[in-house]
Image (cartoon, rainbow, N blue to C red):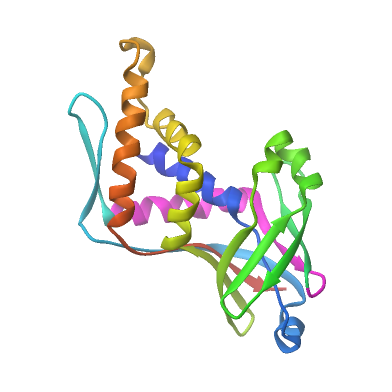
Amino acid sequence: MKRTLYYLLAVFTVLCAVSCNDDEKELSSLTGIWNYTRPHFEFEYAADSIVIEMYQGRKMAVATEEVKEIFLRMATVKMQDYFQGIEVISANRMNITAKMQTAQPFKIGADYDQTTEFIEVSLDKKDMQQLVGEKADMIPAVSFRYTLQNETLTMYFDEAYVRTIYAMMENRIVPMIVDNMGIDFEHMPEGVRQQVIEGVKKQIPLILEKIISLKIGFVLTKA
């Protein structure tokens, strides 16, 4: 389960980047450098545990509180390995500072639009092609909810956005989740992996329906 959560974290981390506005007052307060501080994760589920049916009647149950602990622990370690912060340059332009583990930090340019509730970020295709090749064309604009208190900026996805992203990418997300569940398919009959994939596809919508509240993102502090 920890490997599955690690993959989900990786998916959300790839989607994460951010910034500012149409309103002159907010623009002046957000222009500048914002450093990544910590992950932001709130999770309320309509059951005490999340149950995943794996294969041959086997089930995996993980307590909801344990999911929170595992996710926050992994996010605290992993997010800081990849994401350093943003630099808001103008009313519709920013740079995102990232790194690949021990490599030198690099910047990804992005355009953005801001409303009172959302910040929509579109990463530069050219910059992303250097990281993910042709897959850069498949990366959509990302809409974050946000809150701004003093010099702390919190950017996050909510449960509705997560459901939308999953619906768009189900055929790619589910096989990768299955491959990170720690199941040794090599020593199983042919076709078992596909059976597990189909089983997980049926279960994930049921799991998503039980999510009462979900906020997943990061907290930035102005330099």
Q: Nearer the viewer, residue 213 or 164?
A: 164
- Residue 43 location, x and y as percent? 36, 62
Does the image show residue 102? no
Instruction: Please tell me which residue is depicted at 79% across the width and 75% down the height of the picture.
Output: 91
Judged by its main secondary structure, the magenta piece is helix
* Image quadrant in which the C terminus is located: bottom right
Q: Quadrant of residue 215?
A: bottom left
Query: Is residue 158 left or right of 136 when viewed as pictured?
Result: left
Q: Quadrant of residue 17?
A: bottom right
In the picture, measured across the screen, residue 166 lies left or right of residue 57, that is right
Nearest the viewer among 94 and 86 is 94
Q: Which residue does the image show at 70% across and 74% down from the upper left?
A: 20
Q: Position of residue 117 (x, y in %)?
A: 56, 77
Q: Residue at x 73, y 35 (%)?
A: 133
Q: Is residue 73 magenta?
A: yes
The part of the chain drawn in magenta is 66-91
